[in-house]
Image (spheres, rainbow, N blue to C red):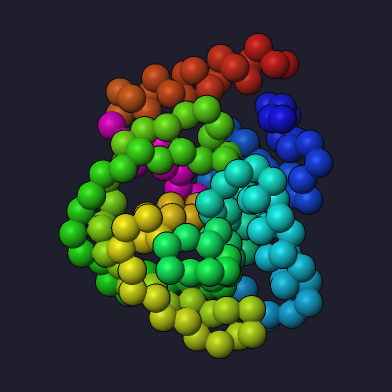
Amino acid sequence: MLVLCNIWLMSKLTIKIYPDKILRQKSGRVRKIDGPLRQLASDMIETMRHANGVGLAAPQVGETKRIIVIEAVENNPLPLVLVNPNLLKRRGRSSFCEGCLSVPEVTSEVARPEFIAVEALDLKGEVLKIETGGLLARIIQHEMDHLNGILFIDRIGFLKRKKITKTISSKVCMEL
């Protein structure tokens, strides 16, 4: 159950809801992969699953660290944890309807590169290189945007974005 004051009942971590200011902050690089970071990743996966999400970025749970988790999709049998992800290549273009755990009950078509190459660290500190397209590419890009303070609603047309933000503001005001 979602409550606009940023609480997901019974989940491990609290998912921040737009317009929470942390969602607009740029995350800092992770300097050390240690026990607390591994625990954060584990808690993020549990929280993502509890919320029926396919991806989650640290800022969405109040941490300005460059770490994202992605549910097992396509050919990946386990969830992915990407630390300090860096987009190396992108090509093509496709549109798809996106939503976000931090912007509940809102979806919109978003155009993104169809294929990407990403480099990141895993939780052992080893370099991962991923070349992918389709759903996984889209999820990675969406979650990486969070690390830079960008929401999917920033990637849609001005008029549609204005309508969405006005609707969200009205809901927040009604809850107060």
At x 47%, y 81%, the residue is 128
149 drawn magenta: yes
Query: Percent from the top left, x then y, of residue 1?
Result: 72, 30
58 drawn magenta: no
Closest to the observer: 22 or 50? 50
Q: Is residue 101 left or right of residue 136?
A: right
The residue stretch that appears in magenta: 148-157
Q: Is residue 158 left or right of residue 163?
A: left
Query: Percent from the top left, x then y, of residue 105?
Result: 52, 27
At x 57%, y 65%, the residue is 79
Residue 97 visible somewhere in the drawing: yes
At x 40%, y 40%, the residue is 98
Query: Percent from the top left, x then y, of residue 164?
Result: 43, 23
The furthest residue to the top: 174
Q: Is residue 82 left or right of residue 94?
A: right
**Quadrant location, the C terminus:** top right
